[in-house]
Structures are given as C-alpha cells and as structure tokens.
Image (cartoon, rainbow, N blue to C red):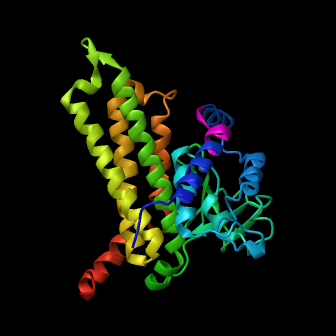
Amino acid sequence: MDFQLDDDQRALKAGVRELLTARFGHEGLRAAVDNGPALDRTLWRELGEAGFFALRLPESDGGVGLGLPEAVLAFEEAGRVLLPGPLVATHLAAGTVDGAATGETVVAAVDGELVEWLAEADVVRGDAAGAEPLRSVDPLTPLHRVPASTEPDPAAVLRTSLLPSLFTAAEQLGTAARVCELAVQHARTREQFGQPIGAFQAVKHLCAQMLVRVEVARAAVYAAAVTADPLDVAAARLLADEAAVRGARDCLQVHGGMGFTWEADVHLYLKRAWVRTQRTGGATQSEDALADDLLAGTAQ
C-alpha cells in the first residue's frame, strides 16, 4: 500500500488550510474564546459550501465524492486551528440528516455519557433525555452528561466508533503538529543569556521528541485512513492522543511562564486535546481492542 499523499490530496490539504486559516486564524480563535461557546452559524454554512461535511458523499448525491483518506486530511486541518463545533457528528450525518451536508443543520451525537454542543444542535443523534450541563475544561467545547444506560456490547461499540475515533485521531494529529510548530517558533525567537532558548539542549530535546511523536502518529493515522481496519484505527488513536496531549504539555514548557497565561494559545490546545481523549471510549477502548487481539494471537 502507498501511504504517501498524491498531488490532489496535497492540494486538498493546502486548500482546507488556506480556508480555515482565513476564517478561523488566531484572531478568530481568540474572538470565539471571548464570545463564549456559541457556534458561528455563518462559518458552519461556509464549511458546508466548501464541502467539508459532504466530502465522502457521492457526487450523484450532491457530495464531493472523495474517500476516507481525504476526509482525514480535512479533519487534521480542523484540529490544527482548533475549529470548534460538532464537526464529526455533522460530517457523519451528511446524507442521512437533511441540511447536514450543506451546513444548514448542526448535528450533535450522544457519545457514551457525553454530548458535545447539545444546546447548539438542531438534531441530536442518540438518546439525550435527562442530559445535564457539565463544566468543560475547554472553553470552546460545551458538554452535557446523559444518564448512564445499560452496558454496551464492546464489539458493537468498536464497530460504530471506528469513524468517530479515526476523525478524532486526525484532529489530535493536527493539534500535535501545530503545537510542535508553536514550540519551535518560540524556541527560535525567545532569548535567554544572550541566545535563543532553542540553543539549549533541554529545549532542543523537547522539540525533537514532539516532532517524533507527530510523525509516528501521522504515519499511523494516514495508514488507518487507507485500511479502515478497527485495530489500525485503535493504534492510531492512541498515538495521536499521546502526540497531542504530551505535545501541548511540552509546548507549554517551552513557553515557560508565558505559556501559563490566558493570552497564550497553548493552554487552549492542551484543553481541547484533553477533551478529545474522552471521545468514543477514549484510550481504554483502544487499549482493550488491541489487547484482545494480542490475546487472540491474531496480531501481526
């Protein structure tokens, strides 16, 4: 299998990055934080017009007609700019919920005991009866908790969570790559003792370790997008979660005291990465899937 991006995929990735940077760059992110967790419906419709939610729909159904690898690239770019909103739920509803593909309808979904963006959703998939607001560590991801239901079948959960888990891994990959860039930019320009802090070995090592985690996660996420194998997705999710959370923590360390201030964006990346780790069963579900496969003796 060839996991390298072709020219069309690179052009798609660059196009999505250009769109999101223009519509939700640093100023857009800070404005969203200042305004609270309110979904920007205009931006949502623009995403729909650009085909973000209809990427995998057949052209005969009004979609873009692309595949899972291309959708993963779009979600990676969304994670890079911390694009808020129920992106995964709305993308997965395209073609089955009227208006989801065009961004006219915002779709949220019950995920275990949590629902993201419940109050802003036009359509909720799953039983959200009795949902109660939950304080979210991420200022741009409002959460509700729904009452616990019966214990689900682990095999069924693994099947239904494959795409949400893969798209979450792609978002985590985008976040991991961005915090690595922010750390390197700061290390190159911030000076101490007459030289950039990036000249010090401790800072060099932090940045190098961040890059290694990003590239390992990238290879796993891109491969999982091609194979769509549940075990590949589980491995990719674990690696992407680690790259995002540990990368954001290390980026914060490189920024020193500045990284702990509200004005710096680093804490926003860390908080979003934390919240994403709770989706679709989190690390526990992925670890259980890989462990079960190892015990069954089918792992290669």
Kindly report the secondary structure that dominates the magenta region of the rendered protein: helix
Rendered view: 119 above or below 56: above
Instruction: Return the residue found at the far front.
Output: 7
For image coordinates 28% across by 27% down, the residue present is 198
Rendered view: 227 above or below 82: below
When asked about the image quadrant of residue 70, the answer is bottom right
The quarter of the rendered structure image containing the C terminus is: bottom left
Rendered view: 17 above or below 105: above
Residue 136: percent from the left, percent from the top?
55, 49
From which residue to which does the magenta span run?
20-26
The quarter of the rendered structure image containing the N terminus is: bottom left
Q: Is residue 113 magenta?
A: no
Q: Is residue 176 left or right of residue 279?
A: left
For image coordinates 65% across by 35% down, the residue present is 28
For image coordinates 45% across by 36% down, the residue present is 266
Q: Is residue 23 magenta?
A: yes
Residue 192: percent from the left, percent from the top?
28, 16
On the question of residue 256 being in view, the answer is no
Q: Is residue 146 left or right of residue 187?
A: right
On the question of residue 95 being in view, the answer is yes
| Nearer to us in this view, 249 or 148 | 249
For image coordinates 62% across by 68% down, the residue present is 66
Rendered view: 26 above or below 70: above
When asked about the image quadrant of residue 143, the answer is bottom right
Instruction: Return the residue found at the far left.
Output: 201
The image shows a total of numbered marks equal to 0
Residue 5: percent from the left, percent from the top?
47, 60
Residue 94: percent from the left, percent from the top?
71, 69
When asked about the image quadrant of residue 12, the answer is bottom right
